[in-house]
Image (cartoon, coloured by chain):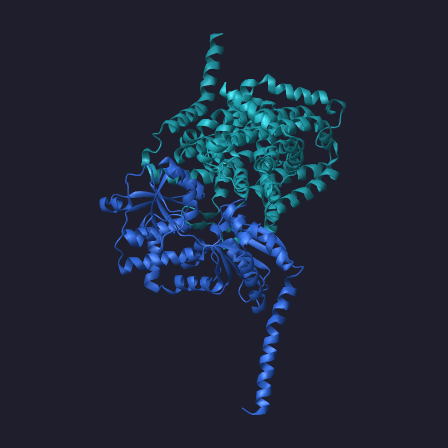
Chain colours: A blue, B cyan
Amino acid sequence: MTKRSSIFAFALAAAALAAGPAAAEDAAAFFKGKTLTFMTPGSPGGGYDTYMRSIIPYLEKKTGVTVVPVNDGGGGHRLVVNKTYAAKPDGLTLLLTDGEATLAGQLLDVPGTRYDLQKMNWIVRANGEKRIFLFTKKSPYKSIQEAKTVGKPFKVGAVGKTSAEGMAAALAAHALGLNIKMVIGYKGSREFVRAALQGEVDAISPSESSAKRFSKGGRLLPQLTLARERSELFPNVPTAFEAFKVSKESAFWLDFNSAFSEVGRAIATSPNVPADRLAFLRKVFTEILTDKAFQAEMAKKRRPISYADHKTLEKAVSTVFGALNAERKKQVQHIILEKFY
Amino acid sequence: MEYFSLLSEGFLRVMRPDLLLIMLAAIPFGLIFGLVPGLSGLTALAILLPFIYGMQPLQGLALLLSAHAVIYTGGSVSAIILGIPGSPPNAATVLDGFPMARQGRGGEAMGAALAASGLGGIFGVLVLVAILPILEPIVLLFGSPETFFLALMGVAFIAVVGEGPMQKGLISGALGIFLALFGYQSVTGVPRFWFGSDYLLDGFRIIPLALGLFAIPELIALSSKGRAVAHDSDESKITFAQVKEGVWQVFRHPALFFKSSAIGAVVGVVPGVGGETSPFVAYAAAKQTSKHPELFGKGSIEGVIAPESSNNAKEGGALVPTLAFGIPGSTGMALLLGGFLILGLEPGPEFLKEHMDLGVGLAMVVAISNLFAAAVMILLARHIAQITHLEGHILAPLLLAVVVLGTFASKQNPMDVVYVFVFGGLGYILKELSYSRAALILGFVLTNAIESSLHISLRSYGWLFWMRPVSLIIIALLALGILWPTVKRRMRARKASAS
């Protein structure tokens, strides 16, 4: 390397080093004083809303933005995703998404889906939970193994075909060879829990925190964790891989299901947002979600934080879409939309 | 005895200066949100929710509950004096309240509506406290088949709530059902009649529909005639005596009051039927059993007492599943549940075992708020009703601004404002042709409950889903409700021929 080229390389490196903080400063300056729209499909007072509204004061303090919260669960939770995807690419529109339903919309070509999650900019995940299979006290079976052996169908309650717990139950039943009959149409998790307590359905598959809340007093009986690792909230409940002899094909479906829950309650923004603003948003949200005081505040509200960075989310999204060839996609559509109805 | 000690303990528990101050602050807030068309109880609660962070549980919940409990009390006033429901459940009050205002009896209608609201709210609370110790088994009695039959009962009353002939009521109800079919269908996951529009993907919303149907035709009438709502004559001057007379009317109709409040409390207990249903069902039941059904829709005081008693009684009932299982009995209760979780409380059977005192305290907050709101509004009624003497060309633009802003505020969606005018056009045509707008609303609000609960019932229980004790009781009541007018007519005819 000549002396001149060394000087040139040094100058370039110095410029690059200086540009990093400068870009961050530019991004920070951009957000200061602006109005940011933060949307969620969850209704006011619910889980998504609590996460969103708890983050807002921290976000305003750290960035100087004024946040306008929007709750819009329309179109099976897809309207807010459409709006975020079509928003101006300036980083001023954020979405706290219902990962499973959002993924299902695109995967199953549900009418009204106008987004591509692989092009969406993922920021962080606030919470992602494993699903627990619970039997009701009035269920005809005492254990999930007995249900499989007898083979007589049992009823599983859910909100809809493409709701998180509906898809989890269908994929798990297909993977493990369970004979289930899906009963859908409940407005939300509380309604299908009520149905379970009444004996209207025999089983449900809510998130682990909901399962913990509703199984208090032995009213619902946990059977199975739908993941490779056990749930911290249910250390004594076996995973599907422990409770059953799982073939390679079955493992594919169980892992596919886990990839869905991996996205969970994630925060995203529209495609093509400038890289410096994106980096700034990721840094701010990471600081908020890993802050011990914030985590304690959320734990008190029974809304735990299980942080994941954008790389984990991008990987989970590409696992869901990348794992499927045309034939597999047809199979997924059949399992989720037809097989148990 | 235990019941009364529960009540008195709960009462003493909320008689704290800090709690009374919080209630005093929340009640006017709730009343204003009720009064202004478009601003719903849900919006009021969403605004108040962030303020409860850091409060003690009873303080935070008192703030939310006090505001929420009195929304419909405020809404009844706009329904009567302007013919515009403050919130969708007040639409049933328009049917007779507004004709009374036009006859210069606005004071009497308001007195009756406010007293019925306040006392109905207290009735709901008494029911709640009575069943607090046995909430779980009671709520478990009401599954999807019962929700279906209760919603069906509402549909059966569509023809009865109609202002015009029965056939026209049924056509309006069918139109309401049709409009409710637009948008995303949760059972199949497929949107219907959405024509590629994101707005229609979500289906039509109740606020633009209710305001369009009721407000726009009145605004057209006000601006085209330019006259005030009430005819300006000496007889129509609103006096406190008129308001007092209205209050007394509630006491002169005890059976009607108890029946309507009981309907409200039962509809509140059953999650999923929808809070908008109870005032219509109470109205229809009142019309069917009234000695003067022909006066309904023309300014009958019974037509005001029935929906208003049930409206506020419903909220006591809606607290039942909220406290028993953490399952909200109405949309407002869903937000209240968010409040519970923010304050670190988890409603459910375990919650009631540990915090029965808090449950009774909350019931008392609802009772006191209802009483206080009714008293304040009765004292102010005479002054508020002066609006009915404002000339149309002054009042109409003011109201139009309120309607547009209220609609926009509910979802911050400009398309909602466009649809207020679309439904306004429909409302104008229906009004001119004497088709019932109330029946349309009732058909609209019940469709979703009927569709989902029928689907669940069939999947879960098969074709014999109706063979359950509570379902059979509701079916019997339904049959009685449908056959009663015929039975009554025959009895009268027999009496007449005998005499």
Q: Position of residue B102 (x, y in %)?
A: 68, 28
Q: Which quadrant of the view contains residue B63? A: top right
Q: Nearer the viewer, residue A144 or B239?
A: A144
Mark yes or no: residue B102 visible.
no
Q: Residue at x 73, y 24 (%)?
A: B236
- Residue drawn at point x = 59 percent, y = 76 percent: A17
* Residue B116 quadrant: top right
Instruction: State the residue lying farthest toward the right.
Output: B234
Image location (x, y in percent) of residue B35: 65, 36
Q: Is residue A101 above or below residue A192?
A: below
**Compared to A272, does B338 lie above or below?**
above
Name the residue furthest front.
Answer: A292
> Residue at 41% of width from left, 55% of height from top?
A261
Residue B471 can be seen in this image:
yes
- Of residue A249 and residue B467, the one placed in the foreground of this image is A249
* Residue at the extreme bottom: A2
**x and y percent of residue A289 in the render?**
53, 56
Percent of width and height locating residue B332? 55, 38
User: How many numbered discs?
Assistant: 0
Q: Nearer the viewer, residue A67 or B405?
A: A67
Q: Is residue B476 left or right of residue A151?
A: right
In front: A154, or A56?
A56
Q: From this viewpoint, which residue is outermost toward the left? A: A149
